[in-house]
Image (cartoon, grey):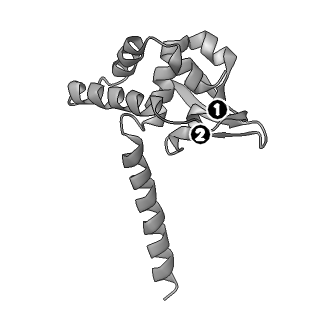
Amino acid sequence: MYFYEVIEKCDIEEVVRCFLKMCVNSPDIEHTEQCVRHAITDIKAIEPVKSDSEVIQIERVKTDEEEYDAVHMFDEASDTKYGLEINPWKYTLGYTVDEKSLSEYGDEKFVSLVLWEMTWFGYDEKTIQDHVKSWDEAEYEVRDLSDI
């Protein structure tokens, strides 16, 4: 199953509730709610780019200091894990989902955790990609200055 298919069968109100539970430090929870709802609306309009070799997984991580859910994409071709924070949404939507993770978390919690990563904790895709572009431009400028 692809990630976009999981979203399609979810109770969106429950996804939003799950997402907002992760936002305990939000200074403006109403604004955060509007952002996640807007992201979901945007996502539904995107044409996914399907991939069967890239799988969204969630693992429960426990350290001495904390416990959290680690969301990542596992690339079966390179046997490598990647974050989803700066990944274009059309690709993330077309990744397959790890059935074990999906069954452990349930559809709505799984989607909310992936949205948390996709939206970089609440941003829209344009804002995220603008940040990435500014990093690329800053790196280019630094490289140019070092060649002088």
* Residue type highlighted by circle 2: Tyr
Q: Which mark is on residue 61?
A: none
Please say if 45 is above or below 1.
below
Residue 56 falls in which quadrant of the image?
Answer: top right
Residue 76 falls in which quadrant of the image?
Answer: top right
Q: Is residue 63 visible?
A: no
Q: Nearest the camera: 21 or 96?
A: 96
What percent of the width, then of the height, locates residue 89? 51, 39
Identify residue for label 2.
Answer: 91
- Secondary structure beneath label 1: strand
Residue at 52% from the left image edge and 85% from the top image edge: 147
Cα distance between the residues tagged 1 and 2: 6 Å
Identify residue for label 1.
Answer: 95
What percent of the width, then of the height, locates residue 66? 48, 25
Q: Residues within 10 Å of mark 2 (few under 14, many from 20)?
A: some
What percent of the width, then of the height, locates residue 43? 46, 32
- Secondary structure beneath label 2: helix
Q: Confirm or deny contact between disc 1 and disc 2 (CB under 8 A).
A: yes
Q: Going by the picture, which residue comes out furthest to the bottom?
A: 148
Residue at 64% from the left image edge and 25% from the top image edge: 2
